Image (cartoon, grey):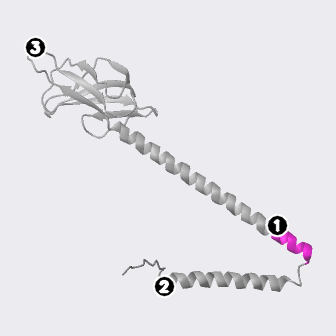
Amino acid sequence: MTRRLVLRRPSGAGRRSRFALGLGVLGSIAVICGTRWWLGTNDWAGLGQWVGGMGALVAAGTALYIANRDVKRELAREAERVRVHAYYVEARILFPQQSMQVPQVAVVNAGTEPVLNVRLMTLHRASPSAPSAEIGGGAECPVLLPDEPWTIPLTVFPEEGDTVEIVYDDLAGTRWRRNGKQAPLPSAN
């Protein structure tokens, strides 16, 4: 035994749409019959042109509305893509494996697009009693390509849990500031 899937409208919706269509047809017939003696042949032709012009105006307005809506949607999608890409850039502290080595900071771009003007700003201490330290000494990476880390030796010795704050620009020109694994924020400077 086979079952057929039958899609049905809610009972009131079908009646309402048929009623509206019937009311529109009856209204049109009433207008035509009521004005038949009042309007001549040339008047009816002019009326048809006016109705056609109004229809074209409504169609043009609808097309502009749809185009504007699509542009806004695309801009929002692009802004979201840029915001998500900012999460792929991160600074990590590399602790030395041997006692004679110097700790380093590696800035990694795990995204698909390069970032520009990467600068190390501050080493934020995990301990609230220890002050933050300015790092980087003005070092800047003009272009950080995807999957190519930028490594810089630290002049201060970090402790476990410390984070590094970086500043960088994306290809859209937005400047971002990120501290460790925290969410990146648009930066004013």
Amino acid at pointer 1: Gln
**Quadrant (top left/top right/bottom left/bottom right) for the C terminus:** top left
> Is 160 displayed left or right of 19 in the figure?
left
The location of residue 53, given as percent across then percent down, is 77, 63
Nearer the camera: disc 1 or disc 2: 2
Instruction: Specify the farthest residue to the top.
Output: 100
Label 1 SS: helix
Kindly identify which numbered label has been placed on residue 49: 1
The spot of residue 51 in percent (x, y) is 77, 69
* Extreme residue in the left direction: 99
Specify whether 94 is left or right of 98. right
| 8, above or below 126, in the image | below
Helix, strand or loop status at disc 3? loop
Is residue 7 highlighted in magenta?
Answer: no
Residue 181 quadrant: top left
Q: Whole-Å distance between the Cαs marked 1 and 2?
A: 39 Å
Residue labelled with disc 2: 11
Residue located 35% across and 37% down the image = 86
Looking at the image, tell me whether mark 1 or mark 2 is earlier in sequence order: 2
In magenta, the rendered stretch is 40-48
| Marked residue nearer the N-terminal end (1 or 3) | 1
Q: Main secondary structure of the magenta part?
A: helix
Q: Nearer the viewer, residue 129 or 122?
A: 122
- Quadrant in which the N terminus appears: bottom left
Callout 1: few (<14), some (14-19), or many (20+) C-alpha neighbours within 10 Å? Answer: few
What amino acid is at disc 2? Ser
Residue at label 3? 100
